[in-house]
Amino acid sequence: MEIDSMEIIKSKKALRTILKSSRSAGKSIGFVPTMGFLHAGHLSLMRRARQENDLLVVSIFVNPTQFGPNEDLDAYPRDTERDTALMLAEDVDIAFFPPAEEIYPQGFTTYVTVEGPMTQALCAKSRPTHFRGVTTVVAKLFHLVMPDKAYFGQKDAQQVAVIQQMVKDLDFDLQVVVCPIKREADGLAMSSRNTYLSPRQRSDAVVLFQSLAEAQQMIASGERSALAVARSIETRIKPVQDAVIDYISVVDAETLTDLERLEGKILIALAVKFGKTRLIDNISINCGGPCR
Ligand code: AMP
């Protein structure tokens, strides 16, 4: 089947039907899962997927199972019309907008969980059920779309690590493509949640990127103590009005386990609350040292 303009699909059945005929016509499928309220970060994933695949599928689904009981599920920003226009402009072939009951029908009781430190560290400490929700919905979407390649942002570094683990462990026959973090002109990582920030919080939030950039400088100048790096970031963020640090972690980029000495590929990740808005950011750095 030829797809000339963007198909907007809400049901699993319609999605499967259209993708089945594309697949049997030999078309490669690129998939970008999102929660919508699209920004340039999302669009960068779509552009990469557009270049690398015959068919581009984007899902927009604010996934209830990845939100904790006191989190922002109801308040999460949504703008279907704007998202639709943006996807059209990116030459998306299929926009999948499932209603919640299509993904979680009555009686739904099966979850996909990646066990171990990867889903207990960093964001999981304050969001203990978050990654179970992410892996469950992403596994379901992978089964529905059966993409050749799926695109994720390094902005959510822990999510990337968890999904790569799930893909490996459960033999999903697809390639996970990780795309770089898109930032605003002042360095703040783009996020749908940035819209929650007051003007003052918005300008103060640049401290996250600045503190990570300074940490990178320290490491480039030879610092190899994880504690010293984490302390320098903390010293920079703590005095900022409204900023409450959730965590600053210096970990192995692949396993996400804590480091004392910096060696190999590391990830410095942080989460900071500005009022009710929780922002995350990270930087990955190759510190050299013994090959692994
Ligand atoms: P979300 O809608 O927040 O679930 O994000 C959907 C996808 O877009 C995820 O793979 C995110 O990591 C990615 N993403 C979100 N923000 C950015 C950003 N600033 N730069 C690159 N990718 C991003």
Image: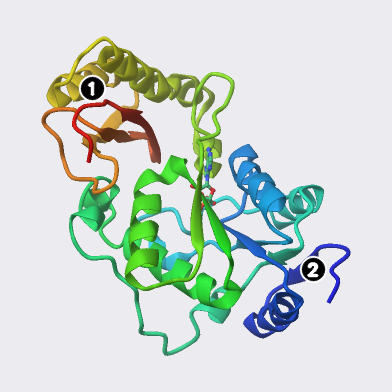
**Mark identifier at residue 292:** none
Q: Residue at 55% of width from left, 59% of height from top?
A: 150
Number of dots carrying numbers: 2
Q: Dot 1: what SS?
A: helix
Q: Is residue 74 visible?
A: no
Where residue 74 appears, x then y in whole percent?
50, 59
**Is 236 placed left or right of 5 in the picture?**
left
CB of mark 1 within 8 Å of CB of mark 2?
no
Residue 172 place in picture, x, y as percent: 44, 71
Left or right relative to 4: residue 107: left
**Residue at image x 62%, y 54%?**
78
The residue sitting at 88% across, 64% down in the picture is: 4
x%, y% of residue 240? 33, 18
Q: Which mark is residue 7?
A: 2
**Residue 93 sits in which quadrant?**
bottom right
Q: Residues within 10 Å of mark 2 (few under 14, many from 20)?
A: some
Q: Nearer the viewer, mark 1 or mark 2?
A: 2
Question: Residue 139 at x, y = what percent?
Answer: 45, 71
Q: Residues within 10 Å of mark 1 (few under 14, many from 20)?
A: some
Give the residue at mark 1.
Answer: 234
Whether ligand 1 has any atom under 8 Å from the Cβ at mark 2 is answered as: no
Task: Give the vertical position of 231 relative to 9 (above or below).
Answer: above
Q: Mark 2 is on which residue type?
A: Glu
Name the amino acid, label 1.
Glu
**Rendered view: 47 above or below 180:** below
The residue most toward the left is 260
Residue at 71% of width from left, 51% of height from top?
Answer: 50
Q: Residue furthest bottom?
A: 107
Residue nearest the observer in this picture, 185 or 100: 185
Q: Quadrant of the N terminus?
A: bottom right
Foreground of the two, 104 or 114: 114
Spatial CA span between label 1 and label 2 = 47 Å
